[in-house]
Amino acid sequence: MFEIQNYGSFVAAVIVFQLIPGPGTLAILNATARNGVAAGLGAVVGTLLGDLIYMVAAIAGLAAVMNSHPAIFAGLQWFGAAYLGWIGLQLLCQPVAKATPGKEARRSGWVYCRQAFAVSLTNPKVMLFFVAFFPLFMRPDASSLTLGAMMLHVTLLSLCYQLALVLVGNALARKLSVLPSARKLATRLAGIALVGFGVKLALNNR
């Protein structure tokens, strides 16, 4: 579908990555817990804008590689499979830190938008992820529209998940942000899934 290879795996992998409690997720949960839905929505916008910038940069580089160096693109596919597995192993082994949100003065959603945007931009690993991730689901002769469709999928799925984080409510967001067992379970399950995706996609790309 949309010239995306392994479409079901692509969508599932994007969802799994959303479930990993990263800096953006914690920024959204903390904003919602501290100042309500408007603050959470502001953090969602900031996170999506930061990710969009990295996606555009990654896609621009991939488009150039696809057109000029097919062999390098094939190497990126193998690198992507290995990178997914490595991220999965990291999630399985790393300790899960506990967030400690506290009380703060009333602030507008715009303040949290800027904060989340800064958090997103200070994580350049996001661009590395997209460079490694997108080639796994593309053919070397895929059109630029495929890259656009993949970027749109990531943005829409991220938006849906992050809106759900906000709309579950202020009280629940606070509990989830400081509940080590829930964060640990989500992190470990995501790690197992990513290792599985890495193995599956490596076998498909042989």
Image (cartoon, helix red, strand yellow):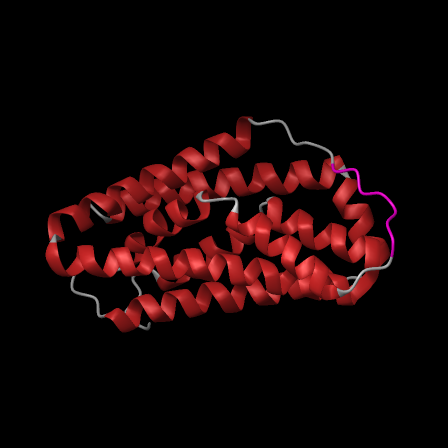
Instruction: Tell whether 29 sits left or right of 130.
Output: right
Query: Where is residue 137, by image quadrant?
Result: bottom left
Q: Is residue 164 visible?
A: no
Dividing the picture into quadrants, the one containing residue 64 is bottom left
Q: Is residue 73 visible?
A: yes
Q: Which residue is pictured at 68% across the width and 47% down the height?
A: 26
The vertical placement of 135 against 164, above or below, is: above
Q: Is residue 113 above or below residue 21?
A: below
Q: Position of residue 172 (x, y in %)?
A: 82, 54
Residue 86 to residue 126: above or below: above
Which quarter of the rendering shows the N terminus?
Answer: bottom left
Main secondary structure of the magenta stretch: loop
Q: Please state the horizontal and vertical placement of residue 132, each as a whole percent of the image.
A: 33, 47
Tag count:
0
Q: Nearer the viewer, residue 120 or 114?
A: 114
Find residue 31 and report its horizontal and vertical position in percent: 75, 55
Location of residue 65 in the rendering, given as x and y in whole percent from the top left corner: 19, 55
103 drawn magenta: yes
State which region is magenta. 99-105
In-image side of 63 versus 122 (left or right)? left
The C terminus: image quadrant: top left
Please tell me which residue lies in front, 104 or 176: 104
Residue that appears at 58% across and 45% down:
20
